[in-house]
Image (cartoon, coloured by chain):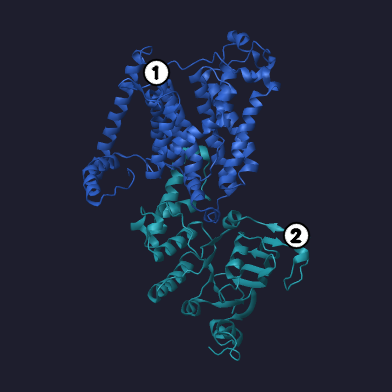
Chain colours: A blue, B cyan
Amino acid sequence: MKNMTKNKNNLYSLIALAVLLGFLAFLQSDTAGYSYQISILERSAIYAVVAVSMNLLTGFTGLFSLGQAGFMAIGAYTVAIFTIPVSARPSVYYVSGISPVIADIQLPVPVALLLGGLMAAGMAALIGIPVLRLKSDYLAIATLGFSEIIRAFIAAPVFDTITNGSYGLKSIPGFSSIFTVFGLAALCIALMVLLINSSYGRAFKAIREDEIAAQSMGLNLFRYKELSFVISSFFTGVGGGMLAMFMRSIDSKTFQVSLTYDILLIVVLGGIGSVTGSVLGAFLVTSGRELLRFFDDPLTIAGVQIPLFRSGFRMVIFSILLMVVVLFYRRGIMGDHEFSWNGFFRLIQGIPDRLKRQKASGTGKGGAKA
Amino acid sequence: MTEQKNVLHMKDVTMQFGGVVAVNGLSLDVNEHEIVALIGPNGAGKTTAFNCVTGIYQPTYGSVSFQGEVILANTPKGKMRRQYIGDVWPQALTPVLKTPDEVTKLGIARTFQNIRLFGNLTVFDNVLIAKHMRAKQNVFSATLRLNHAEEKRMRDESMELLSMQGLAHLKDETASSLPYGLQRRLEIARALATGPSLLLLDEPAAGMNPQETQELTDFIRQIRDDYHLTIFMIEHHMDLVMQISDRIYVLDFGKLIAQGTPDEIQNNPKVIEAYLGVSDDVDD
């Protein structure tokens, strides 16, 4: 009996995967016509990688870090510097020239992405030594500071011949197809899920639950926090590299604190401690922001122009929606649960009951439990 | 009585917080296969003494040895030396300050007075986490599932442990959803999973009714024999302490006021005074 439902669920997953692949293939068949949709989906997938890596740190290890933008910048710049075609470099570094050290090194994209991740991980290892001794909010502030330092370094005139300073980098080779982006994102997320469900993942969760108890189980707190921080930063770096390839041109302003907040928003909205929540959140937040775009256009009803509808208004609506979500679904869409077909069907079957109860009692509370 | 092998040796352990001496020159010994109890009125410094053994606190002065090896030793320095008001005047010791995880690796496991389970994790995961420390694997082999054999061994051993504690049927429950008594039992199971030779129990019977306490008494004896343990515990239930302990140490205001067998302790006037107060100036 149990086996049968398992088979059934595997079948559902296969169908869902086939539908997704079919949908992507459909978009891929007319890249020019669907370029808007493709760009939303690609950005969502990249944000999903970064959000899951942040969740690994915040949701599973209990370390609240706000350094994401900094580590993304390291990954993005590494990928950009090593993948811009050598022939295009003179036009990119037209202001201050290119440092001879990197002038002729061009790496294949996978190697550059890996290197981007490793650079971010290396920087995290260094930063982690002093910072991970801090707790909760203090850790967040310290990592936020470091993230800004990284950004300042990138924009510093001293490094103009490497990072091209405030002019940014362009001519970064893009992704050949939407499948590359989704494949890479899926690979990164799958690796993180495997880690979370491994013995090390359990150790991280133990530290999140109770540091003193974790220590008395023989876990060296600093070592495991550092490990989690480095791994999370590695994937954040890879995500940053992917973002660079997606955007084709980057500059230090791309990686401001607001980028970290975007990711934080996804994590909180999806549910702290839920991987599927983060993935879901990434797609909802990124596409939600675009879908609300009609609020930015002037609206005229019966010849009267509604004054509020103008550029920037969608962000107001978006923020209000967020506040509503945080107020009523405090634990995010998924809480700390993961998506499962059984939970999904239970949710759907439960909707009529819930509506009835809501009518009866007049108070409707409770988040989606899947 | 034959000479027994010493497991835990505390010498002049003093723990001072600011101007308060929580543990004052405590010296005691726990020998192999013994059950030793540390008792005393509330605030006597019993848990602080435990924390000094497991490395959660670094004692201000004194040394702790485990199976002949010094695991913690400290001498007050600088400002602390000027403020030092412990009874035993400190002589220079080479500082050895092991962290709690290192102490656990050596083979000292403990439970906590206010249960510290990994509340949101399952019962099974709680035990499994304790197995992580001694597993032969690294983060890559674990992530890529190259540690099949090791993971299976950890799971099997944890399952066996849970079965022996009668918690097997609850393995998928969230730890915090268990009733209080079972949470205590799980905490002991988790401590056993770290593979200790010395088990420190901090008030294992707290909040238990007489029947549960009686069960616990048998349980403690049983795990001592099954796992070849030495047990050092803090307890308030005098029935339990008197029944089970080979020897008892009594702490009051951080100082050791008595030690001996249960019979000796029961008739010790100093102990009675510490627990009931001095009779001549109390009339309520």
SS label for mark 1: helix
Residue drawn at 66 percent across, 27 percent down: A153
Residue with the most extreme bottom position: B280
- The amino acid type of the residue labelled 1 equals Tyr
The one nearer the camera, A22 or A286, is: A286
Residue drawn at 62 percent across, 15 percent down: A105
In the rendered image of this protein, does residue B30 appear above or below residue B153? below
Residue of label 2: B94
Quadrant of the rendered image containing residue A329: top left
Mark 1 vs mark 2: in front: 1
Locate residue B219, reporting x and y percent.
43, 69
Quadrant of the rendered image containing residue B185: bottom left
Locate residue B44, reporting x and y percent.
60, 73
Label annotation for residue A36:
1
A205 left or right of A83?
Answer: left
Locate residue B29, reporting x and y percent.
63, 72
Is there any visible trace of residue B148 in the rendered image? yes
